[in-house]
Image: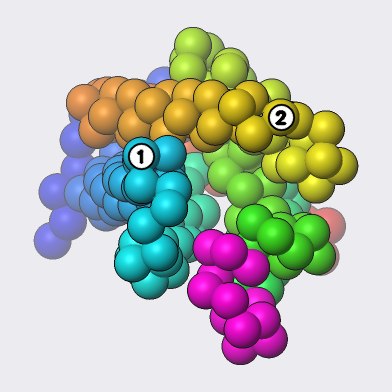
Amino acid sequence: MEIVSEVYQGQFGEFTITKSDRLSVIVYRSALAIAALCFATGALLVLFQPSNFEILNWLTWLHIGFSIGLGVALWTIHIYLELLHRVLQIFWAIGAIASVIISFYFPEPLAIAIYEHPIALIGVGFNFAALTGIFFKETFCFNRFETKFLVPLLPVLILGHLANLLPVAIERSLLGAWAVLFTIFAIRKLIQDIPPDIGDKSVFAYLKAQKQQAV
């Protein structure tokens, strides 16, 4: 039998937090930590070993790890708005599929293809749009200082590179800031209390009931 925790008072009634609920939060945070570790490692390699072409294959594997971690996080995150949740998942799927296509279509390693071909960055950029959605949710729910910077930073860097508006020095600075803030965010999530990440389960139950009535 599944063990439940104490009873909480939600907006639409009482609810309990189960072992399964806690496990989903642990998986969510672990997936975010993997994504952050892969991204930060890749960013450090690019920033401090820019002329070392031997790292390009490592960047491909790090991108795969980042994408898998992000995908798992998006499948286990608790978001009240189901439509927003599905949109972020679709964005991730588009970015993941685009990465596979780019790997086969362009002769360059994945990292070079994404950097040099705008159409490639547009496709993979959906992954980063999904990540921005997570940062936005965390800002709205927990008022985190690091995500307040990450929400505008990601589109500024990606769109600025696409439009060729940012000097290389600025791009490097923004990439470094992204890696540091993403790492801080992931670490703080690991030590945060679990219940707040589960949210108000009575809201989920209410929305589910409303949807069933509509059908």
Q: Nearer the viewer, residue 16 or 97?
A: 97
| Colour mapping | rainbow
Residue 31 point in image, percent of width and height: 34, 52
Residue 130 point in image, percent of width and height: 63, 49
* Residue type at the position of mark 2: Pro
Q: Would residue 76 be seen by someone viewing this image from the given angle? A: no
Is 82 on the left or on the right of 165, as rendered? left
Looking at the image, is mark 2 or mark 1 earlier in the sequence? 1
Mark 2 and mark 1 residues within 8 Å of each other at the beta carbon: no
* Residue type at the position of mark 1: Phe
Residue 151 point in image, percent of width and height: 64, 27
Helix, strand or loop at mark 2: loop
Q: Is residue 117 magenta?
A: no
State the residue lying farthest toward the front: 51
Mark 2 to mark 1: distance in Å? 17 Å
Residue range corresponding to the magenta coloring: 100-113
Residue 134 point in image, percent of width and height: 56, 39
The residue that mark 1 highlights is: 48
Q: Nearer the viewer, residue 170 or 94?
A: 170
The residue that mark 2 highlights is: 167
Magenta stretch, overall SS: helix
Residue at image x 64%, y 39%?
133
Residue at image x 70%, y 60%?
116
Q: Is residue 105 above or below residue 10?
A: below
Q: Would residue 122 be seen by someone viewing this image from the given angle? A: yes
Is 21 on the left or on the right of 53, as rendered? left
Residue at image x 36%, y 47%?
49
